[in-house]
Amino acid sequence: MPQGSSHRRPHRVAVIVDAGTNPFEVGVATELFGLPRPELGLLEPLYAVTLCASGSGARMNHGFFTLTGVPGLEAVDEADTLVVPGRPDNVVPRGADVLDAIRRTHARGARVVSFCTGTFALAEAGLLDGRRATTHWMWADTFRDLHPRVLLEPDVLFVDEGDLLTAAGSAAALDLGLHIWRRDHGAELANAVSRRLVFAAHRDGGQRQFVERPLPDVPDESLGPLLAWAQERLGEPLTVADLAARAAVSPATLHRRFRAQLGTTPLAWLTGERVALACRLIERGEERLDVVAARSGLGTAANLRARLRRETGLSPSAYRRRFGAAPREGVRT
């Protein structure tokens, strides 16, 4: 959905690169928020990324390279969002200057995001006491021992607490980053970014971190063809039984495959895809809720309202005001 220029400054994202930081997660932040997006048809960038480090730079995980030539930690004071990547030595306390930078960023109302074990830094800074958070499943027990007052959810991809967002692992950082795109700019732009990345457009944060993938006992039991078939028919009265029949398996077998390959259930996946389609329809200017509900397969306007609020925290009218065209007079939501 091409967007015109709003003549507003880009949303400023600062990424703290600490000693031992994982390069991949720094790359995730720069890929998601720092690169030009010609596929979006934007006249101006929506985000601007600044890497920052304590002192003259930071030696990366395993000494792959040393990052130099970046601003100091004072760069966080201009950020609208702060990203804290993970590092493997989580029992080693962060530097006082890093923790102070995280605290003061949050204290002035900016959004703070952690990738993978960056959650340890947020907890060390005291931001997560009494709040929900996640981290990599391998570090869950260690995290609980060190930070017992944090409400850890170790078996999800990411947790969105509004001003504090935490991703479970390096790949889940991509899920959280696309979630932030959806939250900031709607499903249409987030989908365009995901297509550019060749990455799943929408994996709900509640999906499991660790997905078992046993060797198949048949030549090909990939869900890919079934998912593509269903995505073209979301407006039809598809049921889990219909999906199972299309895949030529029992509903129980289909359920096991969804759990194994996607970490979710067939019904939850189908509902999530329908809500995402409803969001895109609203963004493209469809104002009649009964039409959106019918075309997305959600059935009724009442169900659309309930599902949209559950998934996005917004009513259809609020979602339209934030991400879509202005409604015509006389249209009720």
Image (spheres, grey):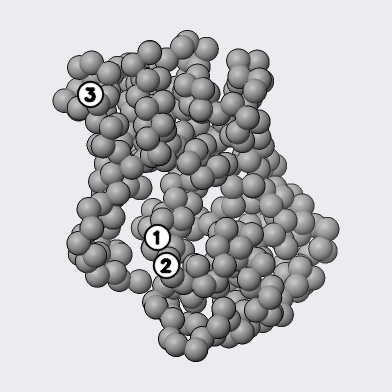
Which labelled disc corresponds to residue 174? none
Dot 2, crowdedness within 10 Å: few (<14), some or many (≥20)?
A: many
- Inter-mark Cα distance, 1 to 2: 6 Å
Question: How far across and how far down the image is residue 194, in percent?
Answer: 42, 57
Mark before the other along the chain sequence, 1 or 2: 1
| Snapshot quadrant of residue 25 | top left
Kind of residue indicated by mark 1: His
Which labelled disc corresponds to residue 72? 3
The secondary element bearing badge 2 is classed as helix
194 left or right of 45 in image: right
Question: How far across and how far down the image is residue 34, in percent?
Answer: 27, 46
Dot 3, crowdedness within 10 Å: few (<14), some or many (≥20)?
A: some
Q: Residue at x 81, y 63 (%)?
A: 251
Question: How far across and how far down the image is residue 29, in percent?
Answer: 36, 40
The secondary element bearing badge 1 is classed as helix
Which labelled disc corresponds to residue 185? 1
